Each structure stands twice: as C-alpha cells, then as structure tokens.
Image (cartoon, rainbow, N blue to C red):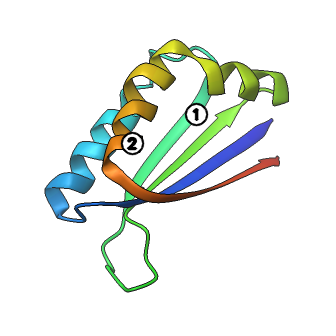
Amino acid sequence: MIKHIVCFKLKDSSKESKEKAKEIILSMKGNVDTIKNIEVGTDFLCSERSFDVILQVELESREALDIYQNDKYHCDVVKAYMHENAVKSVALDYDI
C-alpha cells in the first residue's frame, strides 16, 4: 500500500475557499478507481507556517499511484482546480 499526501496553500485562505477545495478534492471518491481511501482536512490554526488543505490518499501500489497521477478526472477536475487556486503545495509518497 502507498500513502500519497499533498498539502495546499490557497490563494484565498478563507473558510469558504478551504471548504470548496475540500469538496472538489473529495469528489474523487467514486470517480477515481485506484483510490482505496481518501481523507481531506482543512486547517483551523491559520498560523504563518500552516497550509490550508491536506489530501491523504491510500493506493494499492506504486503502479496504482502512477495510474492515479494520470487519471482523467484527477487531472481535468481536481488538479486543474487546485493549480488555479493554490499558490504552493508539498507532497509526500511512502509505503505503508
């Protein structure tokens, strides 16, 4: 199993913007077949070093991660929205 984590710093860090991003990311559930589990959270601390939204996805294998990265829904809907609305992101992928 693989865990894929991405943290996003949004252009607009309002509660409404964070919730919209969360909704868009969670829309992958049922639309991206390789996802075994998905969790999305929004930051409430709002400190200088905080990111606004976190995505955690579990996938079956590294091959499934490659498929996920190129999935049409993931790319056309979620990545497109997040690239338009985020100023920065950091990611981590590891075996679990």
The amino acid type found where label 2 is placed reads Met
Q: Residue 48's x, y, as percent?
A: 39, 86
Q: Is residue 46 left or right of residue 91?
A: left
> Mark 1 or mark 2, which has the lower sequence index?
1
Q: Is residue 64 above or below residue 23?
A: above
Spatial CA span between label 1 and label 2: 20 Å
Quarter of the image where one finds residue 90 = bottom right
Q: Is residue 82 above or below residue 43?
A: above
Q: Which residue is mark 1?
A: 37
- The quadrant the N terminus occupies is top right
Quarter of the image where one finds residue 70 = top right
| Residue at far bottom of view | 48
Q: Is residue 57 above or below residue 30?
A: below
Report the front residue among 58 and 75: 75
Q: Is residue 35 left or right of residue 74?
A: right
Q: Residue 43's x, y, as percent?
A: 36, 68
Q: Residues within 10 Å of mark 1 (few under 14, many from 20)?
A: few
Q: Residue 23's x, y, as percent?
A: 28, 38
Q: Residue 34's x, y, as percent?
A: 64, 19
| Dot 1: element | strand
Marking on residue 23:
none
Q: Which residue is mark 2?
A: 82
| Dot 2: element | helix
Report the front residue among 79 and 26: 79
The amino acid type found where label 1 is placed reads Asn
Tell me the residue at 25%/65% (across/down).
Answer: 13
Q: Is residue 11 left or right of residue 96?
A: left
